[in-house]
Amino acid sequence: MISNPTTAVDKTPKNTKLTSNQALSPDPNLPAPGGSLRFKLRRLAPTLTGETMRIFIDGKYYDEKNAKISVFDHGLLYGDGVFEGIRAYHGRVFKLAEHIDRLFNSAHAILLKIPMTRAGIIRAVVECCRQNKIRDGYIRLVVTRGVGTLGLNPHKCKRPSVIIIAGKIQLYPPEFYQRGLDLVTVATARNLHSALNPAIKSLNYLNNIMAKIEALNSGCEEAIMLNSEGFVAECTGDNLFIVKAGQLLTPPLSAGALYGITRGVVMELARESGMAVGEPNLTRYDLFNADECFLTGTGAELIPVVKIDGRVIGSGKPGPATKKLVGQFRELTKVSGEPIYP
Ligand code: PMP
């Protein structure tokens, strides 16, 4: 399935110009757990000219075939590292400073010293977009602990690696943006703060992947994850919002939600248009009885939800507040961001 962002950057037919809606086609060769829809990624052009993708690793650019890291990198051996998924729209990198701040916060929380400055990474992300002729695309920024021994000890890893991939992504089949997603609440609880804090955007996504597998096994594209107290935390790769009696509500970070950049943008847009915004603890009951529901994420953008655990949400169609926020978000992406081609 396509929803794991790490699988989503693909390459290179000649002279193919893609819109974000062209990425998917039914794939009869993939298994269909629980009878779900079957999709695979079509091969995507990473650059508008169809040239080979150029990937940044520790200050140098490599073409895809030669972009490799060591099997002794603890990012691979232990999921020890941090990452960001970032979007570019209309020749600008959207909310780049916010993503870099979150990256540095995640790294600080796991005692990982990023071997570049904030300004240096910002320059490298923009340059990587330029190298790949990106105007609209998806950027994966990864910092791994680096090469070490086969033991856990991170102090044996002398130098973290910084990797930047600038390509494209399509998280959900395009028709779901029109008609809305069907979600399922899964048994896998979101990580405890005291175990692996969900605020850390680490390379260890097994908690989310286990939940994703449960969703796919139930024929759903995405899972709702609860925390250990039974409150709604988030989805496997997105934040969750409901609209109730004109208010926009989303779980607090303390419930186990990632501090989503898109989440922050949507809350600000809602406030600007006079909507009350709250972050209360939410239960499944609150979701079932919401007027509207939608998800936010850099990869997913804003996507409506129309059914949860078999319960129809609101009218069963994407609601007016959701549609308005989608429109406001699109407008903002036209004018905001770090210019790639100043
Ligand atoms: N929650 C999780 C677990 C995520 O991985 C993501 C990012 N894909 C989000 C929420 C949304 O965050 P953002 O809007 O910053 O992409």
Image: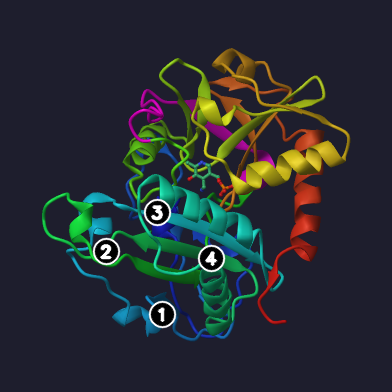
Residue bearing mark 1: 59
State how far apart marks 2 and 4 are (Cα): 19 Å
Residue bearing mark 4: 118
Q: Are marks 4 and 3 in contact (CB under 8 Å)?
A: no
Amino acid type, label 4: Arg
Vertical relation: 108 (above or below) 322: below
Q: Earlier in the sequence, mark 4 or mark 1?
A: 1
Give the residue drawn at x 44%, y 43%: 200
Q: Position of residue 305 (x, y in %)?
A: 63, 34
Q: Is mark 4 within 8 Å of ligand 1?
A: no
Q: Earlier in the sequence, mark 2 or mark 3?
A: 3
Amino acid type, label 2: Gly
- Residue 341 lies left or right of residue 107; in this view the side is right
Residue bearing mark 2: 146
The answer to whether residue 285 shows anywhere in this view is yes
Amino acid type, label 3: Val
